[in-house]
Amino acid sequence: MKKVPIRQRAVKDAFGENFYPGANQNLSRLDAFMMMFPREKFTAMVGMANSNLDRNGLARTTLGELVKFLGITIMMTRVKMRGIRDIWTTSARSKYLPAYNFGVMGMSRHRWDQLWKHIRWSKQPHTRPEGMTHERWKWKLISDFVDRFNEHQATRFMPSDIVCIDESMSKWYGLGGGWINIGLHMYIAIDRNPVNGCEIQNVCCARSRIMMQIKIVETAEEEDEHTREDQAGMLHGTCIMLNLLVPWHDDGERVVCGDSYFASVSAVIEMKKVGLRFISDIKTATKQFPMAYLSSREVIERGNSNALYTKDEDGEVALLAGMWVDRDRRYFVSNTETMEGVEPIFRIRWRQADSTLNAEPERQELTLDQPSLVKCYYDVCSSIDRHNKQRQDDLELKRTVNTKDLWKRVCLSIFGMILVDTCNFHQACVHPSDIDSDPDTFWTGLAEEMVDNHLDGRSLRTRRSDVAASDSSCTNNIATHLTPTTEK
């Protein structure tokens, strides 16, 4: 079976220049953030915030102040506090613990509260239009942000040859959910997932761990509206996968790895029609899959495997159904990779080798043979889980910034995804000497650059002499940003 060649991933800036991993480029953290955040969304956010501020008789905001506000919000995640007011106080908590005194950043707590209350991430009509359901009107607080993010990634990001599809959760610990609805858009509780809240289905480049597309899980009625006519009869997971990968249909072969939610023989066939390869583990969607045959094959030890395949009219392997034994039997369906052996898996485990009374256990090295298909799947399938861990455990926006509005929590989760993308992109592109030693150093450095930004009232240089000076400016002081450097 033919393997998919390796493809370079890259991010395109506003000038059309591609930034590749390992290029050792001179790129500040703020530049990386401005490249990963949709530029049109900045314009919209400033406009919506000013409309709300004008309506309440408050001072208008600018792009620079908006970025400063976001930088201060990130800086909040780097400190331990009992409440927002603690980080603006000038009084020390102890003679050995200095005050945080966030006021030195140039924004008062009162102003931060004003912006937190009036900033909107997505455009929602002030009053619900006639004929629009209340649920659809509530989703408007989120849906535009999702659409702009997806458009930006489809045009600015070129993913590698391996892609992971999975789900993320935006945690919700407030009112609503299983006991009371209280107007929540949609509340998801998954038994196998310890986190409840809003489910976000997404695809991610496995080599760079940068999100490619995201989709908010809505109610069954809303989900039906997203199904295209040519997808009638397909499993729901297959429809979601095809819709998320639309920008990369027939854009060269890529390998997509997904869990059992997306797995089926029909999914492999449909993905092949749009020029994509697919690997997944089969659990419940066993139609057309030789589960009875593979489950009856005799195995001797862990690492054993067995497979069946079908060939097309040209004699090429079209579908492969495989079984591999770890602690239990694992079943896979694929139209790429093979069952040829690759480097084995090594595990260190405690074993009671000596059966005498009170004998000490020993640490032994276990060796498991694995096929290339199994290695490819398990190397890729954890990419989104690792992305989620960076957002939830390293960045910790959910812990620091509390809110009683589900739409704010979901938008902050998407913003957190953009920040994780920024971190992964920046650390891969800069010179090795500029790579931050740990995530905390990167988030702190990014927050400092965002707080100290000079995006307002500064002429911005262009890279092409034929671009008129008037073209580099637009409404609300939004323009392409380049951080000045002292290097010659």
Image (cartoon, rainbow, N blue to C red):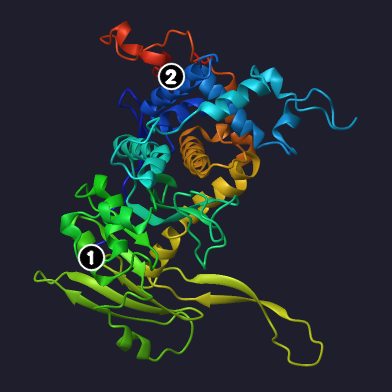
Q: Is residue 212 visible?
A: no
Who's the residue at 51% across and 26% down the image? Answer: 30
Which dot marks residue 142? none
Q: With respect to residue 357, does 334 lie above or below?
A: above
Q: Is residue 365 left or right of residue 456?
A: right
User: Mark 2: which amino acid?
Assistant: His
For the residue pair 221 and 337, the one nearer the viewer reads as 221
Quadrant of the image occupied by residue 123: top left
Name the residue furthest left.
313
N-term mark: 2 or 1: 1
Density class for disc 2 (Cα within 10 Å; few <14, some 14-19, many ≥20) is: many
Q: Is residue 96 left or right of residue 387?
A: right
User: Mark 1: which amino acid?
Assistant: Met
Q: Secondary structure at mark 2?
A: loop
Q: Secondary structure at mark 1?
A: loop
Q: CA distance from mark 2 to mark 1?
A: 45 Å
Labels 2, 1: front one:
1
For label 1, the residue is 234
Who's the residue at 40% across and 78% down the image? Answer: 324
Quadrant of the image occupied by residue 59: top right
Which dot marks residue 481? 2
Quadrant of the image occupied by residue 21: top left
Density class for disc 1 (Cα within 10 Å; few <14, some 14-19, many ≥20) is: few
x and y percent of residue 213 in the render?
36, 46
Question: Which corner quadrant holds the N terminus?
Answer: bottom left
